[in-house]
Image (cartoon, helix red, strand yellow):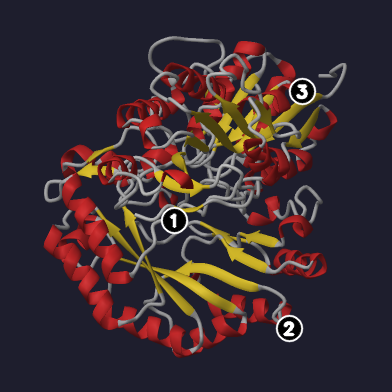
Amino acid sequence: MMLCKRRKILLVQLPIPVLGGQTVRGNIPLAAGYLTLFARRSGLDEWYEIEILPPRETNTLGDAALLEAILARQPWAVGFSCYLWNVERSLWLAEKLKQREPEIRIIIGGPEITADNAWVLHHPAVDYAVIGEGEATFADLLRALLDSEEILQPIPGLLTRRPRMSGELPPWLPRAPLPTLDLVASPYLEGILDLAKEQTLLLETLRGCVFKCKFCYYPKTYDRLYFLSEDRLRAILQQARQAGVREVVLLDPTLNQRRDLADLLRLLAEMNADGQWTCFGELRAEGITDELARLLRQANFTEVEVGLQSVEPRAMRLMERNNNLRAFERGVLAMRQAGIRVKVDLIIGLPGDTPDSVRRSMDYLYRSGLYDDVQVFHLMVLPGTDFRREARSLGLRYQERPPYYVTRTPDLSLADMFTLMQEASDVFGLQWDDLPDLAFPQELLLARREKLVAAAAKHQPCDWFLIRLPQGASVAVPAQVSQPFTLWLSSDDFHRDREAVCDYLESVLQANPFISLTVVLEALTGPAALPGSVLRQVWATCLQRPTYLDRYFATQPGRLAGAKRLVVCLPEEHLPAPEDWLAEVEDLADLYTAALDQTHEPLPCPN
């Protein structure tokens, strides 16, 4: 079929949301690069122009600004790479795109797109869902749409909702994986992704996993291991050298499941003889010998992540992961003696674990001292996993939306899990994704000092907005804001201005429900200007639509905020503040103090 002009396909990968004013890092759209490369090699670039939305936009734009950035490109179809941290935001954007341009085709794929994840598959904005490995399915979909506006014959790996239908989803056929990773190697070599920008190489040398851990989705997709050839691997690493890459992250699900691990490590060491980059990967400590540890270090692995999860026999049996503790100890010791930092993972919430058995796992790891860092995870009952399929028989209850934290097992209540997380924090000295220190732009602090009625960042989309109430109550918040965003509201009587405050919040969050939002309430006349009842109302408004970050942090000890952060700014002339007021404020907000004419960063308020 000959088209009058090439159809524009826009591929979008949204980042892990950040806390406060942090900068997004590591959002490299590798999956989109694979899709683009395979489509090109399938001869589809004659009819389709495939563009990846640049990270400089996906990483910094708020929701409304992202919507406009997508629409400005006038795409024929938009594809979203869906992970648990971005699937809700992706579907929200898809819905808004359909409202503005109903003929835009929406394609979704990624780990969140599984046959049992009904809330995603039933979303009304979705036209096509790619289940499993996506490159060949995506190419077949584009090829089929050349001849017809609808899919006339089933495509393996694809679930379609065009034409629109109600009720049950149509059946879909599974797709066999690619025979070799060389077919998608490499978006870097083809210039689709730019190594020089990120200085990080995301590297897959194999797909598949011989282990069958029931909490993991990965083994369900592949029936064997599929490898990248040595020639392609050498070419990718050579390009990484030329691009000045400083970090290589091995994405292989368990690095030492491959029998030729020693050969792989020798190749990595050969291509990195001067230590230009560090390497990181995940592996099982069992099976790591002194020789393999030496080769890992020679390849410049400076840190590895290993899973322990639990030492409780019943928990190990139910998750189908048997830990040989003596082999685990030998492997960790070998790597640490070779100069490699070892990060060990534990999971709280596993079926078969009890409060006492979780404590035994923590005690075992602590007493052994065989770690440099510890990560303690709350069990996620992920779509597509055996734990999700067996949740009812195992007695697991879990969040219906990402991150799908387990909320109850037959032996653990949510309160138990909260207590155990706190104990793990104390035992291992863990910091739970600390909020960054507050750092406000100087132009915002200058506008505050000059007592402007309203001010916004001069660049668009803006990253801050300041309003002095009640004078500025009629000034609208800019339609397009950045990610993250700060809303600074000053008032001498927040009880009087409470409705205006909530209206501002609702206007920001209606257009940008998934941004990381810092709300600063500056009580100009001291504590009396901000009663606790107003603070609670403001906080309730912030949480009207919980997002991934809000649920992600819900089980972390002492956590005040997820995607929304509430800050009370108190002029220093109103110190000391009443103890009862301080106690009420600190239940919901960070408390900072600053002089009314201050333009440098505010200081923590003394308690």
| Residue 38 point in image, percent of width and height | 71, 43
Q: CA distance from mark 3 to mark 1?
A: 37 Å
Q: CA distance from mark 3 to mark 2?
A: 45 Å
SS state under label 2: loop
Q: Can residue 280 be spotted in the picture?
A: yes
> Disc 1 residue type?
Asp
**Mark positioned earlier in the residue sequence (3 or 2):** 3
Crowding around mark 1 (Cα neighbors within 10 Å: few <14, some 14 to 19, many 20+) is few
Task: Say which quadrant the C terminus sits in.
Answer: bottom left
> Which quadrant holds residue 270?
bottom right
| Residue 193 point in image, percent of width and height | 75, 50
| Residue 351 point in image, percent of width and height | 19, 52
Residue 65 against residue 428 in the figure, above or below:
above
| Residue 241 point in image, percent of width and height | 78, 70
Q: CA distance from mark 2 to mark 1?
A: 35 Å
Give whichever of 588, 258 is nearer the camera: 588
> Disc 3 marks which residue?
72
> Disc 3 residue type?
Ala
